[in-house]
Structures are given as C-alpha cells and as structure tokens.
Image: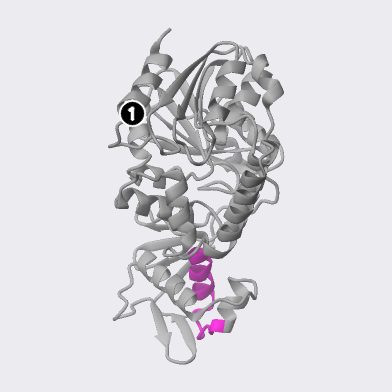
Amino acid sequence: MAYLFGGMILDAERRELRSGAKLIPVEPQVFDILVYLIRNRDRVVSKEDLLSAVWDGRMVSDSAIAARINAARRAVGDDGEQQRWIRTVIRRGFRFIGDVREDAVETRSSSVEAAARQMPCRPSRGQEITFCRTTDGINLAVACVGQGMPLVSIPTWLTHLEYDWQNPGRAPLWRFLADRFRLIRFDGRGFGLSDRNITDISLATFERDLEAVVGALHLRRYALLGISQGVGTAIAHAARYPNRVTKMVLVGGFALGRNKRGSLEEIELGKALIAVMREGWVNENSAFLRMFSSVFLPSASPEQIKWYADLLRVSTSAENAVRNHNGIDEIDIVDLLPKVSAPALVLHSRYDNLVPFDEGRRMATSIPNAKFVTLDSENHVPIPGEQAWPRFIGEIESFLSDV
C-alpha cells in the first residue's frame, strides 16, 4: 500500500518516501513510525502503542521516542511548531493528521517486474537502478552509471545507492570512477534499497549476492573493486571464476576476520562494537557514533562525520548491522589467496585503526600477481581533502587503465 499526502508518497512495500521524484532518506525505525502513525491516523497513538509496534515492547526513554518523532517530522517536512502532519496530543501521544489517500501498488513478486529487473542496465550519464533476485529469493538493488570497462564495486558494510551520492566522503570516489568506467554498484542484502527483512549474512551470502548481480547484467568480463569487507568477496569470486575477473582493486581488506586472527584484544573489541550497535544506533549523539567516527575516519571533518553518522541510520537497522558484523568477523579466505590469477592492486592505510596493516600485507604477499601500495593515512579508506587522497585515486586509475 502507498499513502499519498501533501505531494509526498510513502510506499510501505518498497519502504520508500518520495517528494515528487526525489527519494527522501529515512532511517528504518523512523520509517516504521511513519507507517504506523499513518495506518492508525484515525486515533491517537500512545507511547505504549509505539513501544509495542516499533520497538517490540522494549523499554525506551521518552527522549529517544521524542527524537524519533522529530526525525519523522523532518522527513515529511513538518514544522515542529505548527505540526502540519504529526500532532502531539498532550499526555496522550501522537496522531497523523491531514488528508491521506491510499493506493494499492504492484508487489515486488510480480512476474512482469521481476522479468524487467533482469534486463541489462544501459550505461548512461545518469545512474539507473534496477533489481535482481538471488538464488535464495533476496531482491538486490543494482545501480549502473558511466561507460567503458565494467567495474563492479562490491558493497562495504554501509551502503545506500542513492544516499551515497550525497555523501562528501564517498561521492567523489564514485564520480571519479563513473567518469572513466561503467561503474556498477549494488546494495547487499539487508542494506540500502535491497531487501531488509533477512536472517542470514555471511561470506557465502556475499558471494551469492555478487553472482546474482553479474548474472542479471550478463557480464562476461569485468574488474572488481572491493573495499573493507568487500575484499573477501572479491577474492573468493576471483578464485572461483578466473576467466571472468580481469583485475581487482582491494582497499583496506583482510583475509582473516577479527575472530580468526588469534587476538583476544580484537575479539573483545568486536564484542564492544556489537554492544554499542544494539544500544546506540538510533541516537545521533550516542557514544556509538563518536566511537565509530574515530575508528573508521579519525581525521574526518565535522561535515564528513555527520554524513557518516547519517549513513549509519539510513543504510540499515541495528539488527542487520550486527548480523553483518558477525558475518565478516568469521571470514577466512587465506587458502584462496594463492588461487587468484587476476592482477590485483592492494591498497592499505599505514595507520588503519580498523584493519591491521599486516592484513593488507598478507594479501599482497599471497596473491601471485599483486601490487601493494601503502597509503599515508589513518583513515580506514582515504577521504577527499587528506594528503593520501590524490595517490589513492591516482593508483586506482593507473592500474585499471593499464591494458
């Protein structure tokens, strides 16, 4: 069901909020609040109703509920004082007011739509998004932009095909690559525009997602870009399909996940990260966001940190983030490294706090045809404005363009 109000469309099936043709980023929990308020617009929704419907009965502070309601108001362009759409009813709760029209929408399982999603995307100046389905029935969002050699970017742990273009920490890299190659990106299961309702995330599902994308686009020969957790998927895929993968760019990657490295300190760090994920995902001022900004992007600007924090909330739920975290911590592809025949460019930041420098070196020494480049950065992946950025993009361009 889609709900139309004030020039906006809330599509409950696709979990999208649009104002005209513009997609409005909405974090999953805020989206759930909007859907619940709209579906129950004939009455006042109490705090207890929200706790039961959105938080599964868990105890949440009044300030956390207020923060989520305010985020819902911002998403629909509400004025906090006039309360055009979401009204606070003192001591009773909240109510969605205003005219709402309901429209039935075609479901994702439609055979016509499913067939259309299998059509190859056409390279163009603008990004085109299609969908494909994995062998286990997960719908994945796939984006194509640019022309030339196909370069498939494997998802790192936080992705959103549309929101990434607004992110000052990521958009410059995508623009740089789209100007030179046919850039193909996709949101992995549980993230971005892909299906969110999932139960399993592992290296096996990462591989399954990549195979679904290259199969749906009928790609025969292509290069791979793996960043962070995407590196393991790239290596496993290249070892399995040596005649398809032409080159690989591997950034900030590892062959052994945190639980496989034999370090008690790293295992404890992983447990701490999971704990703060569960508690701090929805609160933009939580210690979770401050810690993650210092681990992933210690030298980022305030603007870049804000965008990274927004990406956390928009890209997925806390539950899926934890599933993903658990999956990547169990990765072990050491035995596959010598089986990779495609030329590989391995880039790793010298002072990376997230993935030890030795993990990058391990891959470079074990992949037969690998070039290793040390980046003078403390960020997990270099960002625009820092000293390592020009070398980072320059090495990628030179490696991929060298025939």
The residue lying at 63 percent from left, 14 percent from top is: 242
Q: Is residue 303 above or below residue 246?
A: below
Quadrant of the image occupied by residue 73: bottom left
Q: Is residue 27 above or below residue 203?
A: below
Give percent across and percent down for residue 378: 41, 37
The residue lying at 58 percent from left, 17 percent from top is: 365
Amino acid beneath label 1: Phe
Assess disc 1: are there few (<14), some (14-19) or many (≥20) residues with their C-alpha within 10 Å of its C-alpha. few
Majority secondary structure in the magenta region: helix
The residue lying at 46 percent from left, 65 percent from top is: 283
Q: Which residue is mark 1?
A: 176
Q: Is residue 130 left or right of residue 254?
A: left
Residue 295, visible in the rendered structure:
yes
Question: 291 or 125: which is nearer to us?
Answer: 291
* Magenta span: 29-47
Give percent across and percent down for residue 68: 46, 71
Q: Is residue 38 magenta?
A: yes
Q: Is residue 266 magenta?
A: no
Q: Secondary structure at mark 1?
A: helix
Give percent across and percent down for residue 19: 35, 58
Quadrant of the snapshot with the C terminus: top left
